[in-house]
Image: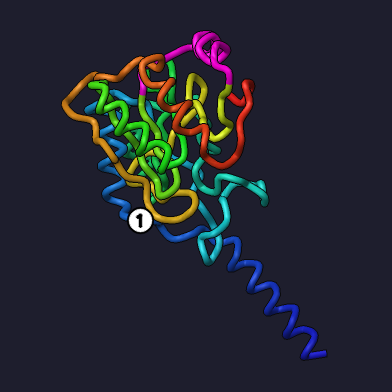
Amino acid sequence: MREILGRRLQRLRNRLQSLRPAPPQGDAPALLDAALTCATTWNWPVLPGVGRSGADSARCACPDPDCVVPGAHPFDPGLLAATTDPRMVSWWWANRAGAPILLATGGSAPCAVSLPAAAAARAVVRLDAEGMRLGPIVATPTRWSLLVAPYSLERLGEILYAKDHVPSSLRFHGEGGYLLLPPSPAIGGGQVRWEREPAGVGEIWLPEVEAVVDALVEESSGASGGGSRLAY
């Protein structure tokens, strides 16, 4: 009987341990500073991601046990709470030190196009060679995201409808979307970083999506995942 009770007690301890919040990930002061820079220097609306839980920090803190973007999505607060108010930003990260930084894309905020890192690097080299002026670029170990001027879903649909092929490895972060920003922990390990950091104060210059989409489509066509005209 004691042996059975002992096993049950150990299982209970293990369960309680798994439900404990994860310790702060990454450099908490750096995340707060970065979130405030986004909100106050560049006027980008941000909010904290849900973060991770468990003793190994491997699981998303949201209720979905099969979450495919663990820690790196809005939950509480929701995406509509994104703000440039430094008081709110400071309060969030004071109470959730180490939370990832999410940019609410679209509206007056930047949008983005993301694709596999190797394909993105080729596209950037090509665009640079063509004399194209690019904006900030966010990088993780597996994907890069090029920030572009805000666009509507209708406008994006018209642009992509004219393409013969749109690879499914190409993703668009427009109005109602979000993007993980540096120096947040990356989804698959490592850290989000700036491949090209925003320069200046106030409104950051961004290219129009039409100016970069051809190179991104062509360079991502050879990436894994195939593609479809309707993959956007």
Question: Could you tell me which residue is drawn at 41 percent across and 42 percent down?
Answer: 117
Based on the displayed image, in which of its 4 quarters is residue 206 positioned? Answer: top left
Question: Could you tell me which residue is drawn at 70 percent across and 79 percent down?
Answer: 9
Q: Quadrant of the N terminus?
A: bottom right
SS class, disc 1: loop
Q: Position of residue 99 (x, y in %)?
A: 41, 47
Based on the displayed image, in which of its 4 quarters is residue 216 positioned? Answer: top left
Q: Nearer the viewer, residue 2 or 225?
A: 225
Amino acid, disc 1: Gly
Q: Position of residue 138 (x, y in %)?
A: 35, 37
Residues packed near mark 1 inside 10 Å, few (<14), some (14 to 19) or many (20 plus):
some
Q: Which residue is mark 1?
A: 26
Q: How is the image coloured?
A: rainbow
Kindly tell me whether residue 49 is visible in this rendering: yes
User: In the displayed structure, does residue 24 sit left or right of residue 198?
Assistant: right
Q: Residue furthest left?
A: 200
Q: Is residue 28 magenta?
A: no
Kindly tell me whether residue 204 is visible in this rendering: no
Q: Residue furthest right?
A: 1
Q: Nearer the viewer, residue 111 or 67?
A: 111
Q: Nearer the viewer, residue 224 or 29?
A: 224
Q: Quadrant of the C terminus?
A: top right
Question: Could you tell me which residue is drawn at 69 percent across and 72 percent down?
Answer: 12
Question: Could you tell me which residue is drawn at 48 percent across and 26 percent down?
Answer: 217
Q: Which residues are magenta?
A: 148-164
Q: Position of residue 180 (x, y in %)?
A: 42, 38
> Is 180 located above or below residue 18 in the figure?
above
